[in-house]
Image (cartoon, grey):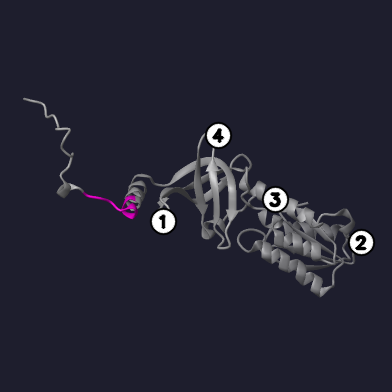
Amino acid sequence: MRAFKPDPGLPLFEAVQRRFLSVTELSELVKRALDARLGALWVRGEISNLRAAPSGHLYFTLKDDKCQIAAVMFRRQGAALRFRPENGMAVLCLGRVSVYSTRGDLQFYVDEMEAHGKGALYLAFEQLKARLGTEGLFSPERKKSLPFLPSAVGIVTSDRGAALHDMLRILRNRYPERRVVIRPVRVQGDGAAEEIAAGIEDLNRLGAVDVIIVGRGGGSLEDLWAFNEEAVARAIFASTIPVVSAVGHE
């Protein structure tokens, strides 16, 4: 059998057989191919060129020491973050690679982001503490003095937990004549921080206690997270009544 040898003087395809793609069609073809072949991916990298758009979307570059890729995290996904992304931060991102058809750019669409190294909750705590510290919320001169023997004590905690029973038992044993005002709140889960802050504000409006105890029993960092929220910190700062933190049972 003789091997086929194309005539270099002839075109590879006849003109009637040629199929030209527009730039848009080419971009869409690449996009569909990527979307079909690549699913969700975890990618580790460093954030750079971070830009928060007025729309709430986050645009940034995800890079390592050799390569980089443009990335975007839309507002809906970004709202679920517990920490604030920053340039130079090492992160783990879950998302998908696709093509932004208008420009033909390869882009990583991020659905979830975790801090790499330090946990997201710890990082969020550090960031919030630093930000509130610059506002003076933790300045020693702004701390309120505790009364030596308060005549009335306010307690902001769950009315179903063991912590409340422990606090009441100790108050009865040590200071049996003290009046106690209890403001029940959720101490864990969605909305708990707002309830704790509202409890502090309510006792301030009532004005019938000399000191406020805010607390609960022990737990993991996640369990205790409501007490680290900004709403609680600002409510304590705004309180005209001294506030004592009591996490643990005794």
Q: Secondary structure at mark 4?
A: loop
Q: CA distance from mark 4 to mark 1?
A: 29 Å
Check disc 2 and give the amino acid type.
Pro
Residue to which mark 3 is pinned: 127
Identity of the residue furthest to the right in this view: 148
Query: Which residue lies at the image location 15% right of the left edge and 37% below the top edge?
Result: 10
Dot 1 corresponds to which residue? 102
Please, what secondary structure does the residue beneath circle 2 have? loop
Which residue is at the front of the view, 185 or 122? 122
Disc 2/disc 4 C-alpha distance (Å)? 58 Å
- Could you tell which of marks 4 and 1 lies nearer the N-terminus? 4
* Residue at which label 2 appears: 147
Q: 10 Å neighbourhood of mark 3: few (<14), some, or many (≥20)?
A: some
Q: Are marks 1 and 3 in contact (CB under 8 Å)?
A: no
Residue holding disc 4: 65
Q: Earlier in the sequence, mark 2 or mark 1?
A: 1
In the picture, measured across the screen, residue 117 lies left or right of residue 162, that is left
Residue at 61% from the left image edge and 39% from the top image edge: 117
For the N terminus, which image quadrant? top left
Secondary structure at numbered mark 1 = loop
| Magenta stretch bounds | 19-26
